[in-house]
Amino acid sequence: MVRKIKPNWIVPAGAEFTEMDKKILYYQNKGCLVPSRKLIKTPEQIEGIRRSGVINTGVLDLVASEIKAGMSTLDIDRLVYDYTVGHGAIPAPLNYEGFPKSCCTSVNEVVCHGIPNEFEILEEGDIVNVDVSTILDGYYSDASRMFVIGRTTPEKQKLVDVARECLEVGMNAARPYCFVGDIGNAIANHAHKNGFTVVRDLCGHGVGLEFHEEPDVEHYGRKGTGMLLVPGMVFTIEPMINMGDWRVFVDEDDDWTVVTEDELPSAQWEHTFLMTDAGLEILTY
Ligand code: MF3
Ligand code: CO
């Protein structure tokens, strides 16, 4: 039996045939994975995501100004909740697939999805990822930063810095009509050049109308693989970079907290991006 796979990109009958249709159909006919139409945001949707991103950035700026040794990760969660709700928005993590808090706080060997907790007190030398996601008028944005509590070791500081560079390198690798794999390839090369590894089990993602949309944005891989990225698409890049081995496990007690298998530190930075004709624009700056 020959099964016909419905192509992702369809030009509706009677619609005008644009330059974008031509380019996307070219790649689709070559067998490449191309986006479906719903992944290309309208100008109105982009404005909505942009406004959501402004609040998301406000939350992270607030965390940046308040975070310090002696605070609990639950204190951070309260800042996130109060600021977000105070600005007429909703913290996207809260009750998302059962997640109990308003942001993720991931300290040292925690890779991501750490749950804020009153007993987890930040100490001098800790490196902490605070991952914040906002819903405003139905539009989602998503970003995270690393915070160093006081001063840390040179090794941990380098990990934080290289993880940030990995996000920049990934961003700069993303040109219109490139592939997700071009981003991942650039990120992994930069991490490996610095003696670090890339987490493979978690990835960036389309975002905007939902928290997690297509495509998966892996932070490793081969150039020219994965989905074609075209103007109007909105997605995150959020590399998780490990000091030791790339392998991770999920804490069985809470089914959320992702930890490095070797318990060496991990660092992550994330932005929400819009693909434009000129490359990526940061919507969570
Ligand atoms: N903010 C995370 C991301 O970058 C997702 C967290 S899911 C949650 O995709 F439920 F843990 F919040
Ligand atoms: Co994300």
Image (cartoon, helix red, strand yellow):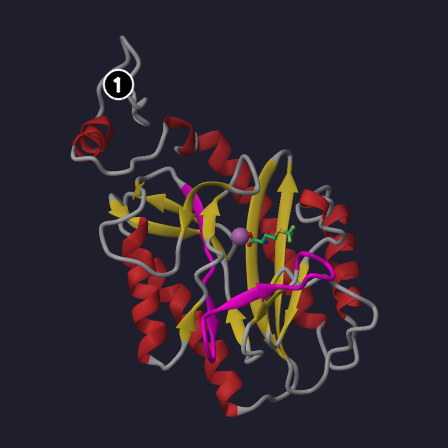
- For residue 90, say whether it is visible: no
Nearer to the camera, 181 or 177: 181
Nearer to the camera, 121 or 133: 121
The residue tagged 1 is 1
Q: Residue at x 66, y 45 (%)?
A: 92
Residue 60 placement, left or right of 154: right
- Residue 108 coordinates in the image, percent (x, y): 61, 77
State whether residue 171 is above or below residue 21.
below
Q: Give the quadrant of residue 71.
A: bottom right
Q: Is mark 1 within 8 Å of ligand 1?
A: no
State whether residue 134 is above or below residue 71.
above
- Residue 64 coordinates in the image, percent (x, y): 65, 70
Q: Residue at x 55, y 72 (%)?
A: 260
Which amino acid type is shown beneath numbered disc 1? Answer: Met
Looking at the image, which residue sits at the far top? 14
Looking at the image, which residue sits at the far front? 1
Residue 160 placement, left or right of 76: left
